Amino acid sequence: MDRAPGLSVRLKLTLSYAGFLMLAGILAIATVGMFLLRKGELGFNERGAVQATPGTMFLKGFAPTAAGAMTLLLIFGLLGGWILAGRMLAPLNRITDATRTATTGSLSHRIRLPGRKDEFRELADAFDTMLARLEAHVAEQRRFAANASHELRTPLAVSKALLDVARTDPHRDTGELIDRLHTVNTRAIDLTEALLLASRAERRSFTRERVDLSLLAEEATETLLPLAEKHGVTLETSGEITTTTGSPALLLQLTTNLVHNAIVHNLPDQGTVWVTTDARPGTVTLTVENTGEQLAPELISTLTEPFQRGTERIHTDHAGVGLGLAIAKTITHAHDGTLTLTPRPTGGLRISVELPTQNPRSDGV
């Protein structure tokens, strides 16, 4: 944005310091003059002008002395104000330099302003925190884009290979080819829809409504009941009414992703998934637990990364596209909540989603 040139903040502060100092000097001299008038050291002639009384001829030099003092105060105010303003604004200059550095694309720079807490240091600390979050977000987006490109390239490459084989071998069974192409194409569509859903949740481009998580949990478990029966997994749902604000579609997708993940990453047989909801003052909680293998703590922290599928990145009939928990995390953050993954001592995983009962961005709307 183009702006007309103006006075710098340092010059404005300098003029302010000097102006206040001059005003203080004028008030001081006026106070001395009033005191001398009341004591009779100064008198008025017939024209009303101030004149020295016969016994106080030394006061003839009062006016020139006062003028000299005011001149010194002006010089001292301008010089001292310029130096003081420079020292006071030095932290702001560092913040400005850091901002200019960030605009060039370098987000690794930090201000790290030393000294005790004040307004400038609070601003610098807040700016450092913003840069750290922005750097992490950009790194995550770049990694996500790279992984998405890799995942999308795979079905396209498989489709090309199948078509090349069919073209060179006209006697090949077309039914098998069509089935394989259908599977690959379905996977590409699912991946694209998952990426669009993650992007929509991240942009928070949705209308907030009052939602009961307990009803969403029941709907998700009913929808995934056939899949649970196929894998020999028992679904158990319990809890109380848990009302929050958000997108019903996205929160249903969040619940479905968590329950789906708990079903497919479970024991080979006789597995169990527990879905519970709980309401607390100011927050509601959705918890999904499942039986399964023992999970290492270092693996838990990577499960919400895009395209991570448990211990291996494999493609099976239920592996999904590797975005289930990543989308769940994105939807949770879009609703200003927290998603926590904890390994169960007996094996399996416990996932808790804590959401505010009323989103702070919708208060008063």
Image (cartoon, rainbow, N blue to C red):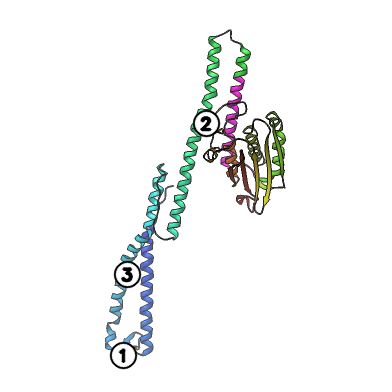
Asked if the stretch drawn in magenta spans residue 183, the answer is yes
Please state which amino acid type lies under the numbered disc 1. Thr
Q: Are marks 2 and 3 in contact (CB under 8 Å)?
A: no
Q: Are marks 1 and 3 in contact (CB under 8 Å)?
A: no
User: Vertical placement of 162 versus 271: above or below?
Assistant: above
Which quarter of the picture shows residue 214?
A: top right
Residues drawn in magenta: 181-207
- Residue where numbered disc 1 is placed: 53
Tag 3 or tag 1, which sits nearer the N-term? 1
Marks 2/1: CA distance? 96 Å
In-image side of 278 versus 81 (left or right): right
Residue 148: give its label.
2
Please state which amino acid type lies under the numbered disc 3. Leu
Tag 3 or tag 2, which sits nearer the N-term? 3
Marks 2/3: CA distance? 67 Å
Please state which amino acid type lies under the numbered disc 2. Ala
- Residue where numbered disc 3 is placed: 74
